[in-house]
Image (cartoon, coloured by chain):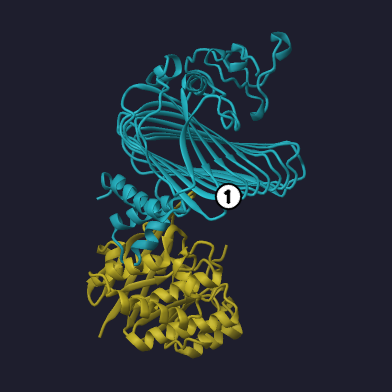
Chain colours: A yellow, B cyan
């Protein structure tokens, strides 16, 4: 069984005020097919964890390790991580002017598979996935994320999740900015992907509402750069009622 | 025609503010439409390279076109045009000549003074037609050229002029889009490495007429193409696009002037360039003038440059003058920078290698303009040409 393991991870970023420690010893283990929710207040380091796993150059790993089936992920380049089976659905997907969605998807699939997918079945698969996410066909002719609404950007991320079939996916605040209908459509897409491929999920969210549609097996509460508490789905219910205040009083909040 | 005096032509340093105008007895040109114009070469003072008009241009390399007598005879062209569309060489006294504008600088006036015949293309008919002109054998003789394109009322056409091979050419291109006509004009400069080409495009867009004007400059030692587009009829629409890719030692320049003259006109200017290799140099100047009668104007101009290597220089100078308060909107933007790291991260996070991601970003960046060309055959060729340009740097 495939395992993504984060051990004693310390991460910093350079800011105008100097080096800032963000992650201060994160431990986490996700097995294939499991869904983990990472919840926490703004600024607690949730997104930093997501981008560090994906390999964003802005984040410096001071110590610790991230392994995928025992292989050190931190030694891999960004694209090698993707080819090893990691996927990050971004909170703010960037626009790529002049690159059409259809061409982008095919290029990514080719890069991941090592060979171009056979054209006709691929187009059928893309169209099917787009239909399931209630995306118009004209979408594939548009430039990646250019002029997309917030909801369209998120659907486009989940479209890639379904088509690229990673082993582990990190969803960074995929629920933010979505109305309830869009949230359901996107959540269904995530659940479909998990059923189809048994992927491991790391769901990063500030709110509990996406957890109504994507059921977590484990919930980790992130505070000040580390996991402050963990438990089962019942922990999310408690956060829903109590908020994060309980955790914040224990730490120094400036 | 206004007589040009040296003082008005920027010979005096630091005259921009006009603070000493009363002492000196002259006022510098204040607005874009007030530049002196003349068809006569001798009306323009010799160029020393310090003039605002010329200071970003390698003046030494273009001396013959500024000062010498030029060969104004017709040259060899290949023409592809549907029946009924006229493409012909005409004499200087043809009524279509001087219908769109007049030179505002010395090289343009020199071409006007010296050309013997003009290549005249006239589009008629409401069904869309495409005219392709290619020229490849201009050689190293210093030449004067003149092209005049006329889109008759309610006609619909595409005119593509493609230039390859060596050249030492100064030319004027006149374009008149008459009432209700739709014209798509594309000028492709894919010259040989030693070519020097200076061009002024004078364009009039009439009432309810639509113009798409695209400049693509890829090859040549010095290529300077300056379109002046006048939205002179009510409801005229002008989209001005540009695409350039400068390699080591190339100078690619474009000075764009969009003049909203009449009411309810819409203008869009978008120029994108890439630079790679030591000494790659580009210049973009974008002047937009919204005149006193141009109520309801909707205008936007932008220039973006992507710097691929060290040792390049891109000048990008947007100017916006507004002479009426009653407009819908006017804006401008300019940005010159290296790769967007977030774009590269996004693509790499999907498994695409760094070199392939860079290639995609550059091609995508320039494709935005290619997508506007509106001629599949040419678009495909431009994609191939851009891929070829890139092969040098990104591996």
Q: Is residue B356 above or below residue A219?
A: above
| B345 and A232: which is toward the camera | B345
Residue B105 visible in the current orientation: yes
Across and down, in percent, residue A13 comes to 42, 56
Quarter of the image for the C terminus of chain A: give it.
Answer: bottom right
Q: Position of residue B25 (x, y in %)?
A: 71, 10
Q: How many marks?
A: 1
Q: Position of residue B337 (x, y in %)?
A: 44, 44
Front one among B45 and A64: B45
Determine which residue is flagged by label 1.
B155
The reply, left or right, for residue B372 in relation to residue A169 is right
Q: Residue furthest front?
A: B84
Q: Is residue B263 above or below residue B48?
A: below
Residue at (70% x, 46% y) in the render: B297
Which image quadrant: the N terminus of chain A? Answer: bottom left
Tell whether B90 sits left or right of A121.
right
Tell me the crowding category of disc 1: few under 14, some 14 to 19, or many 20 or more residues within 10 angstroms, Cα based.
Answer: many
Corner quadrant of residue A24: bottom left
Q: Is residue B297 above or below residue A190?
A: above
The residue that appears at 28% across and 61% down in the rendered structure is: A77
Q: Quadrant of residue B288?
A: top right
Q: Residue at x 53, y 12 (%)?
A: B42
Which of these two is toward me, A200 or B134?
A: B134
Q: What percent of the width, then of the height, locates residue B342?
A: 42, 57
Chain of the residue under label 1: B
| Label 1: which secondary element | loop
């Amino acid at each position: 069984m495939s395992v993504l393991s984060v051990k004693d991870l310390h991460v910093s970023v350079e800011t105008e005020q100097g080096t800032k420690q963000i992650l201060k010893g994160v431990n986490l283990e996700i097995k294939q097919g499991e869904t983990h929710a990472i919840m926490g207040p703004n600024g607690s380091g949730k997104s930093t964890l997501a981008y560090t796993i994906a390999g964003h150059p802005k984040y410096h790993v001071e110590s610790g390790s991230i392994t995928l089936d025992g292989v050190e992920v931190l030694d891999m380049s960004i694209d090698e991580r993707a080819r090893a089976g990691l996927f990050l659905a971004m909170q703010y997907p960037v626009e790529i002017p002049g690159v059409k969605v259809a061409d982008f998807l095919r290029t990514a699939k080719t890069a991941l598979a090592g060979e171009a997918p056979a054209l006709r079945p691929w187009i059928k698969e893309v169209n099917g996935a787009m239909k399931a996410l209630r995306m118009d066909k004209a979408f594939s002719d548009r430039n990646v994320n250019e002029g997309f609404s917030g909801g369209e950007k998120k659907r486009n991320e989940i479209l890639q999740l379904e088509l690229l079939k990673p082993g582990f996916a990190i969803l960074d605040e995929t629920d933010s900015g979505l109305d309830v209908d869009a949230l359901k459509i996107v959540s269904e897409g995530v659940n479909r992907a998990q059923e189809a491929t048994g992927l491991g999920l790391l769901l990063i969210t500030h709110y509990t509402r996406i957890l109504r549609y994507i059921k977590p097996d484990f919930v980790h509460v992130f505070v000040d750069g580390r996991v402050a508490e963990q438990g089962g789905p019942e922990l999310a219910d408690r956060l829903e009622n109590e908020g994060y205040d309980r955790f914040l009083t224990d730490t120094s909040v400036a | 025609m206004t007589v040009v005096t040296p003082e008005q032509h920027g010979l005096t340093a630091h005259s921009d503010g006009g603070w000493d105008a009363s002492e000196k007895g002259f006022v510098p040109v204040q607005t874009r439409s007030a530049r002196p114009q003349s068809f006569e070469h001798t009306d323009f003072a010799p160029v020393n390279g310090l003039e605002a008009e010329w200071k970003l241009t390698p003046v030494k390399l273009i001396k013959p076109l500024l000062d010498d007598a030029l060969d104004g005879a017709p040259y060899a062209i290949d023409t592809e045009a549907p029946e009924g569309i006229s493409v012909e060489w005409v004499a200087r006294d043809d009524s279509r000549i001087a219908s769109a504008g007049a030179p505002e600088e010395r090289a343009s006036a020199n071409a006007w003074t010296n050309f013997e015949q003009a290549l005249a293309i006239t589009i008629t008919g409401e069904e869309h037609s495409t005219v392709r002109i290619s020229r490849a054998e201009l050689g190293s003789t210093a030449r004067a050229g003149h092209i005049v394109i006329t889109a008759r009322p309610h006609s619909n056409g595409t005119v593509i002029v493609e230039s390859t091979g060596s050249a030492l050419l100064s030319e004027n291109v006149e374009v008149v889009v008459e009432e209700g006509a739709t014209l798509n004009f594309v000028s492709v400069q894919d010259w040989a490495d030693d070519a020097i080409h200076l061009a002024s495009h004078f364009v009039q867009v009439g009432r309810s007429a639509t113009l798409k004007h695209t400049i693509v400059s890829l090859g040549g030692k010095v290529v300077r193409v300056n379109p002046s587009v006048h939205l002179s009829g009510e409801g005229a629409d002008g989209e001005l696009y540009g695409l350039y890719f400068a390699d080591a030692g190339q100078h690619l320049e474009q000075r764009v002037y969009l003049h909203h003259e009449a009411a309810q006109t819409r203008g869009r200017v978008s120029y994108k360039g890439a630079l790679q290799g030591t000494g790659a140099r580009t210049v973009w100047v974008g002047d937009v003038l919204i005149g006193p009668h141009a109520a309801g104007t909707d205008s936007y101009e932008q220039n973006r440059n992507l710097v691929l290597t060290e040792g390049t220089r891109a000048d990008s100078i947007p100017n916006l003058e507004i002479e009426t308060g009653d407009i819908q909107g006017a804006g401008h933007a300019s940005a010159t920078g290296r790769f967007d790291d977030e774009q590269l991260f996004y693509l790499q996070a999907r498994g695409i290698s760094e070199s392939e991601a860079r290639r995609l970003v550059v091609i995508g960046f320039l494709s935005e303009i290619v997508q506007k060309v509106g001629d599949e055959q040419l678009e495909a060729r431009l994609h191939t040409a851009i891929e070829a340009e890139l092969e040098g740097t990104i591996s």
